[in-house]
Amino acid sequence: MRIFLTPFTLETATAKVRKAEDDWNTRNPQLVALDYTEDCRWRNRVEFPVGRTEIIEFLTRKWNKELDYRLIKELWSYSGNRIAVRFAYEWHDDGGQWYRSYGNENWEFNAKGLNQRRYASINDMPITEAERKYHWPLGRRPDNYPSLSELGL
């Protein structure tokens, strides 16, 4: 596992965002939680998990509901130990309704490169299966797959 220490450069901030995207696309709560400090604080919609245990519980519930989840993140801005990200992900519920969820995240990292604060704002938009834009096999987005900007998102 490559650690990206602060302060970030364009190269390391971009790599940090891609690593986060790759980890989230595994849909493995235990793996994702390792990117955060033991006492990390989140704001995610109406939930406010604190610490890795609550993050794992939150992500387990999330991916039990958000099926066939595929995510793209894109660096928006960075400074010092903070990164701002925009993202969109597609998923469907157990009734087969597809959604595209759009949002922004603000991240703050400790000196060891672990995320200690994650503030997310997210909106869900129902879409039809024909409107989907993410068609890679579950898991890591291929390197040659278009970015959010290239997809017009």
Image (tube, rainbow, N blue to C red):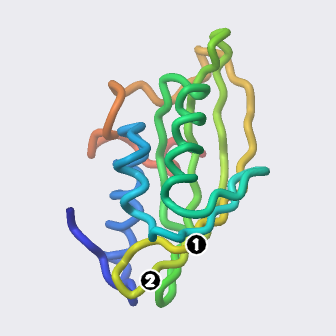
Indicate the quadrant where residue 123 lies. top right
* Residue 68: percent from left, percent from top: 48, 24
Is 118 rendered above or below residue 5? above
The answer to whether residue 26 is left or right of residue 65 is left
Residues packed near mark 1 inside 10 Å, few (<14), some (14 to 19) or many (20 plus): many
Residues packed near mark 2 inside 10 Å, few (<14), some (14 to 19) or many (20 plus): some
The answer to whether residue 136 is left or right of residue 83 is left
Is 135 rendered above or below residue 149? above
* Residue 151: percent from left, percent from top: 51, 41
* Residue 72: percent from left, percent from top: 47, 46
The kind of secondary structure element at disc 2 is loop
Instruction: Find out whether the residues at labels 2 and 1 contact each other: C-beta distance under 8 Å.
Output: no
The answer to whether residue 46 is left or right of residue 12 is right
The residue pinned by badge 1 equals: 117
Which residue appears at 48% of the width and 53% of the height? 73
Indicate the quadrant where residue 58 lies. top right
Which residue appears at 28% of the width and 39% of the height? 142
Foreground residue, 122 or 151? 122
Question: Distance of mark 2 from mark 1, alpha carbons?
Answer: 9 Å
The residue pinned by badge 2 equals: 110
Most distant residue in the left direction? 1
Query: Looking at the picture, which amino acid does disc 1 mark?
Result: Arg
Can you say which quadrant of the picture contains the N terminus? bottom left
Can you say which quadrant of the picture contains the C terminus? top right
Most distant residue in the top direction? 95
Picture disc at residue 107: none
The answer to whether residue 72 is left or right of residue 98 is left
Foreground residue, 25 or 41? 41
The kind of secondary structure element at disc 1 is strand
* Residue 101: percent from left, percent from top: 66, 39
Query: Looking at the picture, which amino acid does disc 2 mark?
Result: Asn
